[in-house]
Amino acid sequence: MRLLLLLYLAFYGISSSAGEIKSANVEHKGKDYRLDLVMEIEAGREGIVALLMDHENFKQLSEVMLESGLVDDAPEDKTRRRLVVKTCIVFFCFKVVMVEDIERPFDDRLLAIMVPEQSDFKYGRTEWQIEPLGPGRSEINYSFHLRPDFWIPPAIGPFFIKRKMVREAKESILKMESLAAGAYSEGTR
């Protein structure tokens, strides 16, 4: 799950060889998880935005994503995406559904707001701000706030969730960099 991946990377300060994690902050308070991550990647802004807006293929970003696609019965004025993710905490494996309304208020900014009544989460908000650093290089400010609507074992759950999120985040960043610089590069889509 992208949250698990990103939290793991942030918690241990891991950087990739191609992309670079400049700063990371992970918080767990009550039932809420929050991740703030700043990274540089070898891909242009338009390629990154195209990748993030490719709802049918969004699942390419993580091996734990089983499904991604647009919701057919979404309100007329909304772009609504549904993700199905399989994850494991220790020996407990489960699938979760995330339904998000996707907004692009500015060219360099994307928002995903969780639709709680169709999701396994009480609250969720993801924000991507993408700034060009030069040809084929961008800085991404990523903010993720999530409140699960399912039970997480309090003694061990948060620790394992953070570890898993960071590990998966590293993999997702590398995939994003490869995909955005390749098939989603400027002018190819």
Image (tube, grey):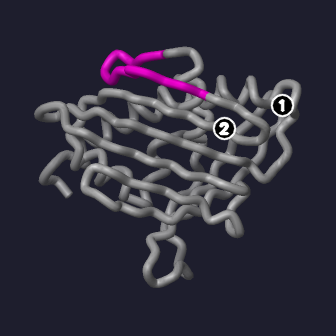
Relative to the observer, which residue lies in front, 185 or 138?
Answer: 138
Image: magenta residue range: 14-26
- Residue 132 is left or right of residue 84, and the answer is left
Between the C-alphas of marks 1 and 2, the distance is 21 Å
Q: Which mark is residue 134?
A: none
Question: Please, what secondary structure does the residue beneath circle 2 have?
Answer: strand
Picture quadrant where residue 165 is located = top right
Residue type indicated by callout 2: Tyr
Identify the image quadrant of the N terminus: top right
Q: Which mark is residue 33?
A: 2
Q: Nearer the viewer, residue 62 or 44?
A: 44
Circle 1 is placed at which residue position?
A: 91
Mark nearer the N terminus (1 vs 2): 2
Instruction: Work out whether 125 lies above or below 55.
Output: above
**Residue 106 drawn in magenta:** no
- Callout 1: SS: loop
**Is 25 one of the magenta-colored residues?**
yes
